[in-house]
Image: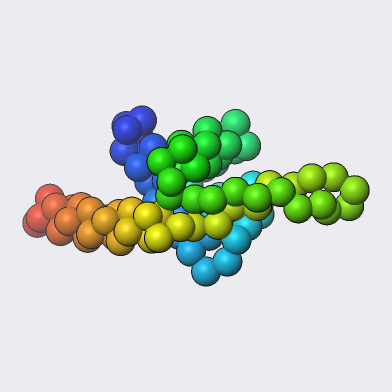
Amino acid sequence: MDSQLKKGLLEGCVLAAIRDEESYGYKIIGQISPYIEITESTLYPVLKRLESSGAVSVHNRLYNGRLRKYYRITDKGREQLKEFYRDMNQMLEVYRFLQG
């Protein structure tokens, strides 16, 4: 799969995974991995990009004596997710055209 296409898909998947409730890295991987291959080394740069762009907010919480980062979608992230859905609908139309 083209790396730019996969990057966009991963960002959309991450935003979708946290659209209803905040979550942490390992749980996000578990939600996404049945649909697209993702590892920790792939996820955390995506989360960092989303945080830098203002699409997600991050806070730490103590869990079993360790700090765990929790990610929450922001209003900007919700708008980005809506745009992702629009793009995916266009891609599905192209796919249907290609299938004849």
**Residue lying at 83% horizontally and 53% vertically, measured from the top left:** 63
Q: Is residue 35 left or right of residue 98?
A: right
Location of the N terminus by quadrant is: top left
Image colouring: rainbow
x and y percent of residue 73 in the render?
49, 57
Looking at this rendering, what residue extends furthest in the right direction? 65
Q: Nearer the viewer, residue 36 or 40?
A: 40
Looking at this rendering, what residue extends furthest in the bottom direction? 20
x and y percent of residue 37 in the render?
52, 42
x and y percent of residue 97 in the render?
10, 55
**Residue lying at 49% horizontally and 42% vertically, measured from the top left:** 51
Q: How many marks?
A: 0
| Quadrant hosting residue 34 | bottom right
**Residue lying at 40% horizontally and 60% vertically, measured from the top left:** 75
Location of the C terminus by quadrant is: bottom left
Q: Is residue 91 visible?
A: yes
Q: Name above or below for residue 37 compared with residue 16.
A: above
Q: Name above or below for residue 62 compared with residue 19.
A: above
x and y percent of residue 81 in the render?
35, 57
| Quadrant hosting residue 8 | top left
Q: Nearer the viewer, residue 74 or 3?
A: 74
Q: Name above or below for residue 38 compared with residue 32.
A: above
Q: Is residue 36 left or right of residue 61?
A: left
Q: Is residue 46 visible?
A: no
**Residue lying at 32% horizontally and 59% vertically, measured from the top left:** 79
